[in-house]
């Protein structure tokens, strides 16, 4: 059993979970590491339990049917991994978009958990939450990945100043970057994500030009923002760089109830129209 | 020839009448069935003392090979020789262009017999056709190859028919993959001989994409086969590693689950294993002796007479199934809790059994297997449609697969090395894999690095699916289940395996 503290020492990061194998987090088979905590709060967030660090309020403890949760001596929440059945009751009860199953791990400890998968994976993708909240952790994990000849990918909401962190860029092979609304419309971006999204297309362009942009990604939900304008503007900034565009249909899976009631799913026509815009710029589009 | 009882004659007569009057079998299926029934009346083999008892108990299974085998079970002709010299008996001269090459092949493969009377190997199609494809307009070449593959599917109505491609990148190989992707068919079965170090990544990716849409090719560990059988090997039938210009006289199999059921404990199991293995090998000796010394096959068949095959390239396959059930039974008898695929104790016991079998097989000598050092070769048999409660080869039973695919592949690696005459495992991926075929490739590479030999991977929404070693169309199985005739004889086997072997319930990854 491990007791978590809220603040993380530099090289450690709160880990929501580690997938030893993932088919959807970049090219080939990859291990995926999900870090806890995000500086955005998107209305359609599909993993709201990764947004906030646990405040040790204790609400989830009695909700666990397996008795896997308890309050530690210092007031932190203790999670008994072996007793946990992954029923997710705790996630559903948590009033703070958090999870009691988060573990504070060092890059070495994360690597040790990935180890058995190594001949089967071509890389590691760190996702979240927002992984760039923990740059020290990322740099160290990236080094360890390189030592094992694994490619190192980041999945980011675009809030981080990548150009200013040479160390991180050196060990990062590629970034998957979200464009969540029209970045030239700060109010709209804030309405969708809680953040004004300033400079996001500059970052996309920087990454694309340095050949470190694997893909741009936009979650499409008609009425939330104008996806045609967003995809058009974003495409223009990455033309001719070999990066691709992933167009994601909004789906209500995992989304918080109030938000889900207000959001619509896109039809094929719209998705194909967006793919057509990408094609017009010579950019490969992937609809999921 | 020994006499048989009138009772058995009457039973066979009834079976013959049932075959003749069947409303479901195609004409060809009837003819093959009738041939088998007639041979079943012949008793010429010298049976070892314990053989009938072990056969009766379901421990040894002859896989329905006839009592008087008129030809070896698997024949792997040297197609290079055909293309270099032509064939006198069939009045074929060496082909000069792609049309001729495909015509020569189409004719020749109809005359390559096997236990099912259909060829189990139709060549290294990419290498054979490459020089002709190089000189041809790509669109025309693709059309001709597509038509040839369709011809094979519709006339060789048996999914044990196999072609090999790779490990080198060829235009012909790429065209074959494209044709199979665009028009998925259950015949021929195709192996992609793969060496991650030398096969170009984009070519392997093309193979992975095709596998995800049409359940083939399967990926064969080229380096592993090469190190055991040398340059002149081919993967044929389900996934059998055999020598080109030869083949396998026979394949019998030991049903380890049934064997363990008769053991009181682990100590009592070892002598049973030894006795059963030796009995089975003595039985195989007697089949081989009949075939080589009495049947006259090697003296009369044009394949042997013209040097497309020769006796000294043949071996025989010692098959086994049900290691999982065997281990689980023995663990229970020993009062231990671990299960095969989920406990180190159980897996260690599995390895110990394989080591023992390996030693027993290597200690047995047959004068007609000089190509493989006088030894039979171990083969992880895929099971047959009527098997219940016995998993193919050394596979983890369906329904008990480990959560992580990579853990499952590591488990395969513990066992695949024992089977130079082939073994393999089958995995189903969720349809999302279609968007990321590199995922499949990474799994195969990891599996090979861990000692895996042969992997077949298909996606959950493909119509062509892999049963245990061969391919069938789901849509054809539905037709047969509704009482309609279907073209491929293997569809019936697939339906049996769906009912008895739960092959449609494989874990999706
Ligand atoms: S998922 Fe949460 S509620 Fe469910 S058993 Fe685990 S800790 Fe308890
Ligand atoms: S996970 Fe949520 S409910 Fe549980 S203690 Fe932390 S903040 Fe409270």
Image (cartoon, coloured by chain):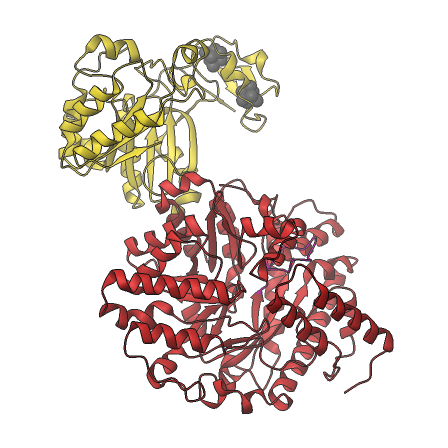
Chain colours: A yellow, B red
Report x, y in % for residue A192. Answer: 30, 12
Residue B71: quadrant of the picture: bottom right
The single residue placed furthest to the right in the displayed view is B6
Image quarter where the N terminus of chain B lies is: bottom right
Does residue B124 appear to the left or right of B24 in the view shown? left
Does residue B421 appear to the left or right of B172 in the view shown? right
Report x, y in % for residue B319. Answer: 61, 67
Query: Foreground: B411 or A248?
Result: A248
Report x, y in % for residue B32. Answer: 63, 71
The mark tally for this picture is 0
- Residue B391 colored in magenta in the image: yes
Answer above or below: position of B140 versus A128: below
Query: Foreground: B325 or B235?
Result: B235
Residue A157: quadrant of the picture: top left
- Residue at 72% over, 83% down: B45
- Residue at 47% over, 49% down: B458
Does residue A61 appear to the left or right of B330 in the view shown? left
Query: Foreground: B239 or B39?
Result: B39
- Residue B92 colored in magenta in the image: no
Answer above or below: position of B508 versus B84: above
Query: Foreground: B315 or A285?
Result: A285
Please indicate, yes or no, whether residue B88 appears anywhere in the rendered image.
Answer: yes
Q: Main secondary structure of the magenta part?
A: loop
Residue B139: quadrant of the picture: bottom left
Report x, y in % for residue A84. Answer: 56, 25
- Residue at 74% over, 64% down: B58
Answer above or below: position of A194 versus B285: above
- Residue at 43% over, 15% down: A98
Stretch in magenta:
B380-393
Please indicate, yes or no, whether residue A75 appears anywhere in the rendered image.
Answer: no
Answer above or below: position of A246 versus B209: above
């Amino acid at each position: 059993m491990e007791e978590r503290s809220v603040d993380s020492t530099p090289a450690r990061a709160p880990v929501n979970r580690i997938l030893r194998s993932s088919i959807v987090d970049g090219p080939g088979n990859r291990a995926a590491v999900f870090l806890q905590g995000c500086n955005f709060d998107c209305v359609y967030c599909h993993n709201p339990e990764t947004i906030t660090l646990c405040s040790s309020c204790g609400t989830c403890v009695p909700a666990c049917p397996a008795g896997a949760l308890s309050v530690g001596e210092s007031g932190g929440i203790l999670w008994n991994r072996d007793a946990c059945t992954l029923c997710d009751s705790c996630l559903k009860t948590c009033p703070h978009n958090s999870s009691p199953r988060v573990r504070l791990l060092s890059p070495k400890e994360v690597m040790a958990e990935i180890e058995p998968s190594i001949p089967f994976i071509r890389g590691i993708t760190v996702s979240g939450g927002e992984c760039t909240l923990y740059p020290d952790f990322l740099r160290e994990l990236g080094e360890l990945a390189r030592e094992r000849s694994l490619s190192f990918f980041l999945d980011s909401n675009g809030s981080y100043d990548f150009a200013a962190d040479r160390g991180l860029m050196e060990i990062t092979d590629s970034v998957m970057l979200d464009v969540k609304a029209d970045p030239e419309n700060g109010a709209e971006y804030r309405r969708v994500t809680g953040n004004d999204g300033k400079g996001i297309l500059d970052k996309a362009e920087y990454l694309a030009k340095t050949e470190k942009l694997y893909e741009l990604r936009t979650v499409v939900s008609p009425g939330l923002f104008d996806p045609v304008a967003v995809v058009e503007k974003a495409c223009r900034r990455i033309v001719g760089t070999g990066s691709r565009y992933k167009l994601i249909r909004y789906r209500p899976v995992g989304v918080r109830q109030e938000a889900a009631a207000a959001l619509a799913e896109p039809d094929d026509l719209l998705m194909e129209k967006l793919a057509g815009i990408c094609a017009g710029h010579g950019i490969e589009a992937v609809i999921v | 020839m020994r006499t048989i009882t009138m009772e058995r004659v009457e039973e066979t007569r009834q079976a013959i009448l049932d075959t003749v009057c069947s409303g479901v079998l195609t004409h060809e299926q009837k003819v093959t069935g009738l041939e088998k029934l007639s041979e079943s009346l012949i008793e010429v083999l010298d049976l070892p003392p314990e053989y009938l008892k072990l056969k009766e108990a379901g421990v040894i299974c002859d896989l329905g090979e006839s009592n008087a085998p008129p030809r070896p079970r698997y024949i792997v002709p040297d197609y290079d020789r055909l293309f270099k010299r032509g064939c006198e008996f069939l009045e074929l001269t060496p082909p000069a262009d792609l049309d001729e090459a495909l015509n020569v092949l189409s004719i020749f493969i109809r005359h390559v017999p096997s236990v099912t009377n259909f060829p189990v190997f139709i060549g290294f199609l990419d290498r054979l056709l490459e020089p002709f494809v190089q000189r041809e307009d790509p669109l025309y070449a693709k059309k001709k190859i597509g038509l040839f593959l369709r011809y094979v599917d519709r006339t060789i109505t048996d999914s044990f028919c196999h072609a090999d491609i790779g490990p080198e990148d060829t235009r012909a190989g790429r065209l074959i993959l494209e044709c199979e992707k665009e028009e998925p068919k259950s015949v021929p079965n195709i192996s992609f001989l793969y060496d991650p170090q030398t096969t170009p990544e984009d070519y392997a990716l093309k193979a992975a994409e095709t596998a995800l849409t049409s359940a083939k090719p399967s990926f064969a560990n080229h380096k592993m086969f090469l190190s055991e059988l040398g340059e002149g090997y081919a993967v044929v039938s389900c996934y059998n590693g055999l020598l080109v210009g030869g083949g396998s006289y026979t394949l019998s199999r030991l049903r380890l689950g049934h064997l363990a059921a008769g053991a009181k404990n682990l100590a009592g199991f070892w002598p049973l294993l030894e006795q059963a293995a030796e009995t089975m090998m003595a039985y195989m000796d007697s089949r081989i002796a009949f075939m080589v010394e009495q049947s006259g096959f090697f003296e009369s068949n044009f394949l042997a007479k013209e040097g497309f095959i020769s006796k000294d390239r043949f071996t025989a396959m010692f098959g086994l199934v049900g290691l999982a059930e065997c281990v689980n039974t023995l663990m229970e008898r020993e009062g231990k809790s671990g299960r095969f695929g989920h406990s180190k104790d159980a897996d260690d016991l599995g390895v110990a059994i394989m080591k023992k079998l390996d030693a027993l097989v290597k200690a047995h000598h047959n004068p007609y297997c000089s190509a493989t050092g006088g030894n039979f070769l171990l083969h992880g048999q895929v099971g047959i449609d009527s098997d219940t409660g016995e998993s193919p080869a050394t596979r983890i039973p369906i329904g008990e697969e480990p959560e992580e695919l990579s853990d499952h592949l590591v488990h395969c690696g513990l066992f695949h090395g024992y089977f130079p005459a082939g073994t393999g495992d089958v995995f189903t991926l969720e349809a999302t894999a279609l968007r990321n075929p590199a995922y499949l490739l990474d799994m195969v590479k990891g599996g090979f690095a861990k000692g895996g030999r042969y992997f077949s991977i298909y996606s959950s929404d493909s119509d062509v699916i892999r049963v245990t070693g061969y391919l069938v169309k789901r849509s054809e199985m539905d037709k047969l289940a509704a009482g309609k005739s279907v073209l491929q004889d293997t569809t019936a086997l697939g339906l049996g395996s769906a009912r008895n072997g739960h092959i449609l319930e494989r874990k999706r990854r």
